[in-house]
Structure formats: C-alpha cells, structure tokens
Amino acid sequence: MPDKTKPNKITVICTANICRSPLGERLLAQALSKEKDSARQLQVVSAGVAAAVGNAASNFSVDVLKEEGIDLSDHKSQPLTQQLVDESLFIFGMTHSHIDIVDAVFETREGQVCLFREFVGPGKNPELPDPFGGNLILYKQTLDAVKEAIPSLVEHIQNNC
C-alpha cells in the first residue's frame, strides 16, 4: 500500500510548459508505467517556471510525440507552484536556469530538484535547449535528447523512491 504522506508525483519543468516538459512528462510516464515496482505508482506531470495557465503544447511537440504513438493534444500548461513542489518526489528541469529559479522561489527538499539529463552520463550535455521557434528537425532532436535521458531517470527514481 502506498505511503500517503510521501510525495507521489514527478514534475518535469521547462519555461512555458509547452515544448520540452510536456515531451518529458509523457515519455517518462510511459516508461514508468512499464515498471514493476513502486515507481509505477508515481504520477508524472509537467509545469513551467514562467508558464501561463491552459496553453496547448506546441504543434511540433504534438507532432513528434504522435510519431512515438503518444497523444499530447490534451496538454494544458500550468505554472510551477509551491503545492506542486510539495507533492513532488522529484522535479526535473531542462536547464540550470530552471533549477536556479526553483531554488530561489520555492522551498525544496535536499536532492529533490535535478536536471532532466543529469544522469545520462559523462560527456553528454546535461542541459536541453529550448526548441521554441525552431523547425520540426529541431523538435525531433529535442525528442531524441529527452528519450536518451529516460532510462537514467527511471533508474534514479527507482533507486530513490
């Protein structure tokens, strides 16, 4: 039986919550749903450090996830809040600036906030630049960078939840 006092969410963040974090949210949720341990019970959500409420995901984000068999058409952006931080076991940001904003604005727990690509391995860029305003090829590269990070995130979550 899950511990009701323990945070039960994983929150993926970017700036506006319309490009990178929705990709990360859906791919990480899909990966965790295939696990056989307590990580499977975690809810994955996304938010933005400068997000408006209710914006749809960018068209290219929807398109690249559709090619993966994942529907993103129902996504609605949301800002990161202290309540969401409190409910989150982990918060994964796309850049160091996202982490810096979270650390400056919100009360967090030790080890709660990490980069989405932090655990990919040496020699790999831990940051994921914003594809907003770019072409479909840039969004596919962003998707590939998100996908590359998923196995290491799943392992980190399993080892720490």
Image (tube, rainbow, N blue to C red):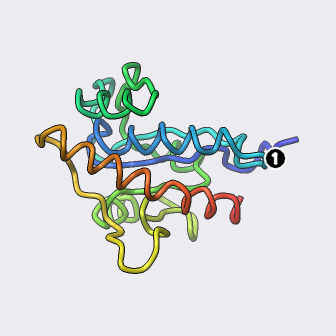
Q: Residue 18: where, in percent of width, then height?
A: 29, 35
In the picture, the quarter occupied by the N terminus is: top right
Pick the residue in front: 21 or 50: 21
Pinpoint residue 109: horizontal percent, then vertical percent. 57, 65
Q: Amino acid at mark 1?
A: Asp
Q: Is residue 36 left or right of residue 69?
A: right
Where is 6 relative to 160, above or below? Answer: above
Quarter of the view holding residue 157? bottom right
Residue at x-position 46% and y-position 27%: 69
- Outermost residue on the right side: it is 1
**Which quadrant of the figure has residue 43?**
top right
The vertical placement of 49 against 136, above or below, is below
Q: Residues within 10 Å of mark 1 (few under 14, many from 20)?
A: few
Looking at the picture, tell me which residue is in the foreground, 137 or 95.
Answer: 137
User: At 37% from the left edge and 30% from the top edge, which residue is drawn?
Assistant: 67
* 6 relative position to 129: left or right: right
Secondary structure type for disc 1: loop
x%, y% of residue 73?
37, 20
Image quarter of the C terminus: bottom right
User: Which residue is located at x 17 percent, y 42 percent?
Assistant: 132
Q: Position of residue 35 (x, y in %)?
A: 71, 46
Image side of residue 105 versus residue 34, left or right: left
According to the picture, the residue beneath numbered tag 1 turns out to be: 3
- Along the line of sight, the residue nearer the viewer: 96 or 139: 139
Extreme-bottom residue of the structure = 122
| Residue at figure coordinates x 43%, y 23% from the top left | 71
Q: Is residue 128 above or below residue 12?
A: below
